[in-house]
Every structure is written in structure tokens, then in C-alpha cells.
Amino acid sequence: MAYRKTPAEIRRLEAAREHLVVRATEVVTEVGWAQASVTAVADAAGIAAGSVYQHFSSKSALAVEVFRRAAQREVDVLGEVLEGDGDPAGRLRRGVEVFARRALENHGLAYALLAAPAEPAVGAERLAFRRRYRALFAAVIDEGVAAGLLPDQDAEITAAALTGAVGEVLVYPLSTSAAHDTDRLVTRLTAVALRCAGAAP
């Protein structure tokens, strides 16, 4: 008869896995993907390096889980704003502002999500999540066009341009410790986003 884990064992394993992902996220935030070795993560979690493989088949699998969780939080927040109350242009402005401010407030993790060198599996996840951001932007732009509040346009192309522009504008300030004027940066970025969609800044 095959051994079956008890509910208590399952809960313990799930808690240990969750603890590991949280600590791995902290390590990636501090040192980036390249330096977030299995040993570094294990040390942060207070476990032996070999124990990491009880929960993840490889460093790559752990990195993908860290990326998915962190990126999904940002997608969810952006979605709440873009699908919330107010006219489409106002929601677009607020969405870009919220995304940028969250990134600049947690620059280590944001840089890891947007641009830091990473292994191919994380790069593939990055592309998948860019498509999610693009879909959110496209939906609010389509809504604005349908309501006559934004000029007629290909919402998918505009959304792709917006997604790329927002990420590119943020990469340098996220990658450097040099001081920058957050309010000025966010104001100018939101103005660019609105002009891209054909709305008044």
C-alpha cells in the first residue's frame, strides 16, 4: 500500500515551500537573479541547500515561481485600476502612475521583474506577463475608443507601445542608485502614456 501524506504533513510542506519562496524573493530583490543561488536562498531560509530540492526540481523552477508570484501581484494591481471606476483616460493615467510608483518604491524587485539578466525560463515568463499587461492596456483603450473619448486606433498596437515605453522609461532609474525625482518622472511618464493613446495629458 502506497504511503500517503497526512493533512498535517501536507500543511507543513506547503508552509515550508511558502517560506522558501518568500525568502527567495527577498534574495532576488537584494542581489538579482544571477546571484540568487540555491545556496544563498537556502541560507536565507535557514535550511540546507539540498532541502530546496524537496520543493523545487531546480533553481530554474524556483526562479519561475518567484517571478510568477511577484509579477502576478503587479498585474492584479494594474488590473484593479484599469478596470475600476472613472473614464478610460483617467484610469489609464492612474494605472501607469500606480505601476510606476510601485516599481520605484521597490526598485530591486521591479528591476528583477522588468529587465535584470535572468535565465531563459524567467525570460519566457517575462514575455508572457508582458502580454498580460498589454491586454489590460488594450482593453481600456478599446473602451475609450468605443466611448468616443479616445481617437480611433489599433488598441493592441498602442498597448504594446505603452507596455514597452513604460518598462523602458523605468529601467534606468531602477538599475541605478543615483537619486531621481520620482514625482517628475511619474508625471512625465503618464503624460507620454496619455499622448500615446491620443488623450490629453
Image (cartoon, rainbow, N blue to C red):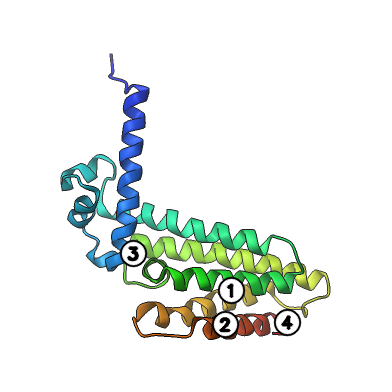
In-image side of 72 versus 47 (left or right): right
Mark 4, mark 2: which one is toward the viewer?
A: 2
Residue 4 pos. (x, y %): 32, 21
The amino acid type, in three-letter code, at marker 2 is Leu
Q: Which mark is residue 97?
A: 1
Q: Residues within 10 Å of mark 4 (few under 14, many from 20)?
A: some
Q: Residue at x 35, y 29 (%)?
A: 10
Instruction: Look at mark 4 in the image and give the residue it sits on.
Output: 199
Q: Secondary structure at mark 4?
A: loop
Q: Residues within 10 Å of mark 3 (few under 14, many from 20)?
A: some
Q: Secondary structure at mark 2?
A: helix
Instruction: Look at mark 2 in the image and give the residue it sits on.
Output: 189
Residue 80 pos. (x, y %): 63, 58
The amino acid type, in three-letter code, at marker 1 is Glu
Q: Residue at x 66, y 68 (%)?
A: 138
In-image side of 165 versus 13 (left or right): right
Which quarter of the rendered picture does the C terminus lie within? bottom right
Q: Earlier in the sequence, mark 4 or mark 3?
A: 3
Which quarter of the rendered picture does the N terminus lie within? top left
Instruction: Look at mark 3 in the image and give the residue it sits on.
Output: 29
